[in-house]
Amino acid sequence: MSDASDARLTDRRNFIRFLAASPVMTPTAVRTLVGSLALGSTNAFAQSYDVLRAPTQAVGDVIAAPEQALNVMDFEPAAKKALPPAHYGYLASGVDGDETLRANHEAFSKIRIRTRRLIDVRKIDTSVTLFGQTYGTPIMLAPVSSQGAFHPEAEGAVAKAAKVKGNGMILSTVGSTSIEDVTEARGAPVWYMLYPTDDWTVTEALVKRAEAAGAPAIVLTVDRQGGRNTETLFRLRRDDTRNCKDCHAGGFVNEVSRKPMFDDLDVSKVTNLYGTGMTWDYVDRLRKIVKGKLVLKGIVTHEDAEEALKHGVDAIIVSNHGGRAEESLFPTIEALPEVVKAVNGKIPVLVDGGFRRGTDVIKALAMGATAVCIGRPYCWGLAAFGEPGVAAVLAIMQREFETIMKQVGALRIENITADMVSVG
Ligand SMILES: Cc1cc2nc3c(=O)[nH]c(=O)nc-3n(C[C@H](O)[C@H](O)[C@H](O)COP(=O)(O)O)c2cc1C
């Protein structure tokens, strides 16, 4: 620990002693402050007048209830505790040494925020409109497969939590819940993320089913064509004493046909969802059958962004699959500017990867993103506590985002501008 942080800790301890001696402090409030010191959080101090908002007990290393969380990262150890090692490994894993995964989040610390003062920010509006639908927040839920591995209520619990603040949601082709059930739980249409199967009949049927359920956008994920080495998953799987074959029958068709979006479809000709030899011709073919909006997820270069425009794509999600596709990539927040520049305002650009704080969100919006998506954080909440866990994750990120929006002096999303960040 550095001298500076030593000094800060001493200051905090003295401050706690002072507060503990104060006649206005209850024993519970003192415990809260001590707990937040143990967690290394400055939150309670920054909002010291609002101490009653802070968690009501010291929680040790792992939170036992959503209300105890100070930030979304607090949910990860709780998810790890709740899940069997292999399922936690599936959620946690990047590829190879997880460098892209780590870089995604670490890159945010290189970007500084510039705040403006003396603006009345008591009332702000965080809503965004995308493809004619208004969402309460620019924080959307990225498609995450197989959420039944994290909690029995899976995507249904996520959708119910997303309804509260109006978070947009994208359902994965290989989700554990059907689009009809998710749409009902969300109380509004969700976007549908498509993996390009190698049987066009199946692909077309998936698109039609999603559109019949009201999906305004089909999101084609384009970053999983070469295979991958999910080492963290493989390592943690070694610690799992269960027999994986009890649930996973093995073989591609068996795995695919377990997923409800493939119900009633003949998947016997599908051999692969990922390495299908997909090219821009496939995008053109899809463009012809998609009645609503077509979105590409996994674009990280200006060259591909320019190509996407030529092929009539309606939006791009700058994404490296949360560091689960390739190692040694640029963090997505660093890839965002070249894509934004290439697109030049013609279509919305979304971004995901490593978003853990409200400040991360505002940085991306200031750099030209229309919205951001989060993946692992809401799954940590789901795994640890089901729907209330997801709701808490979304509420914390939203609260942090609203706080920084006010601090930069932005009343609406359109007021978040490039001069509010300084990169490098
Ligand atoms: C367990 C897991 C499963 C995922 N499944 C999919 C998927 O089915 N389709 C997809 O396009 N992206 C998938 N992703 C990537 C996410 O959509 C998103 O790009 C990524 O999680 C964002 O990074 P973050 O987890 O750091 O927020 C998955 C990510 C995780 C962690």
Image: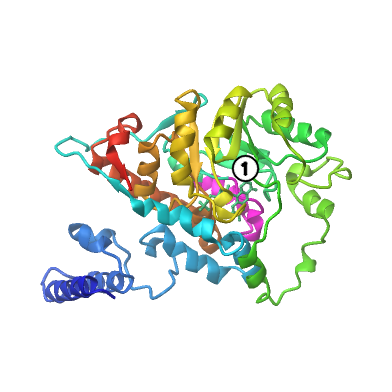
Q: Amino acid at mark 1?
A: Leu
Where's residue 278, x and y in %? 74, 37
Q: Is residue 102 magenta?
A: no
Q: Is residue 361 shown left or right of residue 387?
A: left
Q: Is the residue marked by circle 1 packed among few (<14), some (14-19), or many (20+) residues within 10 Å? A: many
Q: Which corner quadrant of the image does residue 410 belong to? A: top left
Residue at 44% over, 30% down: 341
Where's residue 269, x and y in %? 88, 43
Nearer to me, 95 or 85:
95
Placement of the N terminus among the 4 image quadrants: bottom left
Q: Relative to residue 25, is residue 401 depicted above or below?
A: above
Q: Relative to residue 130, is residue 420 depicted above or below?
A: below
Residue 222 visible in the shown view: yes
Residue at 15% over, 77% down: 17
Q: Is residue 30 shown left or right of residue 189?
A: left
Q: Relative to residue 230, is residue 409 depicted above or below?
A: above
Nearer to me, 198 or 137:
198
Residue at 12% over, 76% down: 21
Residue topped by disc 1:
171
